[in-house]
Amino acid sequence: MNASAITRIVIVDDNDLMRTVLRGILRSDTYEVIGEARNGAVALDMIDRLRPEVVFLDVMMPEMDGLEALQAIKLAQPETIVIMVTGKPSVDNVQESIQHGAAGFIVKPFNAGKVLATLAQALASARRTVTS
């Protein structure tokens, strides 16, 4: 497999256990977790430096929440695929996330199948957009 086929991912969540679980689900030949952050402010700097293809972004975090971070990420790097993560999904959060460019939504506790299916769907959708 060539190196360019590996999807580079950053995980942003203030909960250490959630980052660990998500990292475990994403560990494979096709995905590489290249960075982790505890809040949106730290994440923005990391994403700017590392340029991941995908960011898993928690909605509720200290300092800068996921919705604020999503807007900043999409403004700076519109091609970045952002998948929102939350333990308390609300219609407002989902709608606002999608309006600001989120490619998907995952609810905690994580279900490995759902995480991987959402990621695959977001990647396929982004690739269709690029090629069309």
Image (cartoon, rainbow, N blue to C red):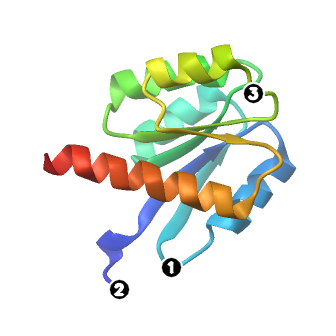
Residue type at mark 2? Met
Residue type at mark 1? Asp
Picture residue at 78% right of the left edge, 36% below the top: 14
Picture residue at 59% right of the left edge, 61% below the top: 116
- Front: mark 3 or 2: 3
The span from disc 3 to disc 2 (Cα, nearest Å) is 37 Å
Dot 1 crowding, Cα within 10 Å, few <14, some 14–19, many 20+: few
Q: Which mark is residue 1?
A: 2
The span from disc 1 to disc 2 (Cα, nearest Å) is 8 Å
Picture residue at 83% right of the left edge, 41% below the top: 15
The percent position of residue 53, horizontal first and vertical second, equals: 40, 50
Residue beneath label 3, please?
89
The percent position of residue 93, horizontal first and vertical second, equals: 65, 19
Q: Image height check: is 125 above or below 3?
A: above
Which numbered disc flags the more N-terminal residue, 1 or 2? 2
Residue beneath label 1, please?
29
Residue type at mark 3? Pro
